[in-house]
Amino acid sequence: MTGPSARLTGSGTWGRWMLLATAITQAASPALSGFTGESASDPVVVPPGPFFAIWGLIVIGCAASALWGLPRERATSAPYARIHWPVSLAQLGFTAWLLAAVSSPAWSVPIFLVMLVCLGTALRIVVTTPTESPTRWLLGTSLGLYTGWAAAAVWVNIATVLPEAARTDTVYLGLLLLGAVISLSVGAVVFRAHPAFIAAGAWALLGVVVSTMAAGAGVLSLGAGAGLAVLAVAAVVVRRRRGEPMAAALPRP
């Protein structure tokens, strides 16, 4: 059998267990790493604490996706058989990122970049592979949220490891914000403006708007607001060119 729905038994038989194990590890790692989240020295582009609640949705979504993909027939077929490795590496990367953030913050940036590459690879597979509606929705939503948040958050992560003087420099922070907007806009094209990717990216930028407004950083706040507008336009343009509404990725009854 050939085609995107063909069985790919090479990794599916054991890859499903790897996916589940790393999802469980990812869920447990915040409690075991000692990572406390916000710091008084965080740059103004770091979103307020409540915005990081999205990690809860991401972790739950990853665990649910791993459980849904456990049946052998599903695990050995695309897209599951093709995403076991990249998603498992990203989930392990999350644990490594937390440990690095506590003990060696500079390493958190390259780890996050590797995670983003793995997530982007997996999400691209999901949005381009025909599959059953529940699988497409569950994987698309969990990976879309994860990838969209990561595409913006990696730039915020860079801001947290800048030298102290640069953390308050509007030019440096503005360039990082521009990088986040460009990453999200490119992602809107590559991932076909998947609603979960767009929503997570917009949530991250909204967090920057709130944090910069609270700090009185008007220029950065305007920049983040403009980034939100750019992302929205990119999503609409991509969807219209494909002849799809933004709700097209939602499951059909």
Image (spheres, rainbow, N blue to C red):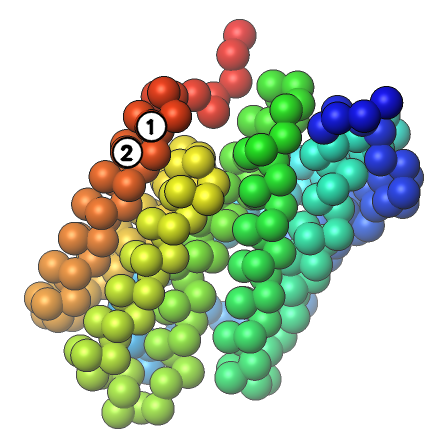
Numbered circles on residues, count? 2
Q: Secondary structure at mark 1?
A: helix
Q: Which mark is residue 237?
A: 2
Looking at the picture, tell me which residue is in the foreground, 241 or 114. Answer: 241
The residue located at (26%, 51%) in the rendering is 206
Whole-number angstrom distance, CA of label 1 to CA of label 2: 6 Å
Q: Are marks 1 and 2 in contact (CB under 8 Å)?
A: yes
The residue located at (62%, 75%) in the rendering is 99
Kindly tell me whether residue 85 is visible in this rendering: yes
Above or below, 98 relative to 239: below
The image shows residue 105 at horizontal and vertical percentages of 51, 82
The image shows residue 46 at horizontal and vertical percentages of 32, 67
Residue pushed farthest top?
Answer: 253
Amino acid on which disc 2 is placed = Val
The residue located at (57%, 85%) in the rendering is 104
Looking at the picture, tell me which residue is in the foreground, 181 or 19. Answer: 181
Residue 238: quarter of image: top left
Please state if 33 lies on the left or on the right of 7 as rendered. Answer: left
The image shows residue 49 at horizontal and vertical percentages of 36, 60
Please state if 225 lies on the left or on the right of 66 as rendered. Answer: left
Q: Quadrant of the N terminus?
A: top right
Question: Disc 1 designates what residue?
Answer: 241
The image shows residue 115 at horizontal and vertical percentages of 59, 61
Q: Which mark is residue 17?
A: none
Amino acid on which disc 1 is placed = Arg
Above or below, 173 relative to 231: below
